[in-house]
Image (cartoon, grey):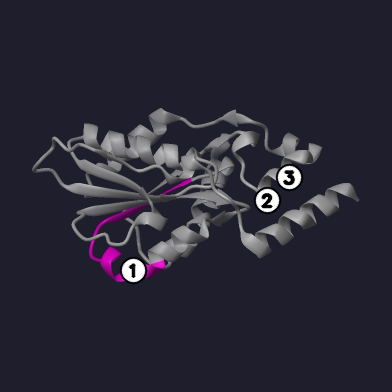
Amino acid sequence: MKENIIVLAVIFAVIAGGCSENKKTGVEASFGEGNMMAKKILVAYGSVSGSTAETAVFIGKRLSEKGLQADVKPVEKIKSIEGYDGVIIGSSIMMGKMKQSVVKFVEAKKDALLKKPVAFFLVCLTMKDDTPENRKIASGYLDPAKAVVKPVGEGLFPGRVNYKTIPFPFNILTLLPAFKKAVPEGDYRDWKKVEKWVDEITTKF
């Protein structure tokens, strides 16, 4: 009975006001400024607890190491994508759904995105175990964005679970023993896999 009340409270809070964000979800960074004649890539992202933001920054840094320029910004702070030769868009996944701000960004920038190579990536616990079945499930989470723009590639990555950074109202779920068992704390990211994906996607821009 107690668990049902907690779950209902989370659902009500999401409907009423969504989830709050912390400072780690709004990170902005630029890399490769010294690569003057290089192509410039925008890494746009939507993060709930900071894990996707950190992954976006890692991607931006790796792009610069491959000789490109990269700007990393949360989608909420991007007014235009003009001046970029390509766009990489990332989203955290909560309860099987892309962050709504990311979906809205793709829809709002559809015309401009269709003129550039675009890649998507996500960060979700489904990819903690990288199996063909889980990859299929995770890829499906990107369907709302892929229905708008066909990507030149997609990256499917696990994230980090830290109960202290889970925003309200989702952090209420950490009070449930069943949640703690199903979603244990830990950093499941494999930076070598992210790096490999960036190296492969770089050739598409």
Which region shows up in magenta? 107-122
For the residue pair 132 and 6, the one nearer the viewer reads as 6
Residue 118 left/right relative to 91: left
Real-space Cα distance between discs 1 and 3? 35 Å
Give residue 198's position: percent from left, percent from top: 31, 39
User: Quick check: can you spot residue 157?
Assistant: no
Which numbered marker is on residue 110?
A: 1
In this view of the protein, which residue sits in the foreground, 8 or 146? 8
- Number of other residues with Cα within 10 Å of mark 1, as a class: few under 14, some 14 to 19, many 20 or more: some
The alpha-carbon separation of the residues under discs 1 and 2 comes to 31 Å
Q: Is residue 115 above or below residue 19?
A: below
Eye-nearest disc, 1 or 2:
2
Q: Residue furthest left?
A: 37
- N-terminal-most mark, 1 or 2: 1
The amino acid type found where label 3 is placed reads Leu
Q: Which mark is residue 173?
A: 3
Q: Which residue is mark 2?
A: 169
Mark 3 and mark 2 in contact? Answer it, CB < 8 Å: no
**Secondary-structure class at tag 3:** helix
What residue is rendered at 63% in x and 52% in y? 95
**Relative vertical location of residue 191 with respect to residue 117 in this rendering, above or below:** above
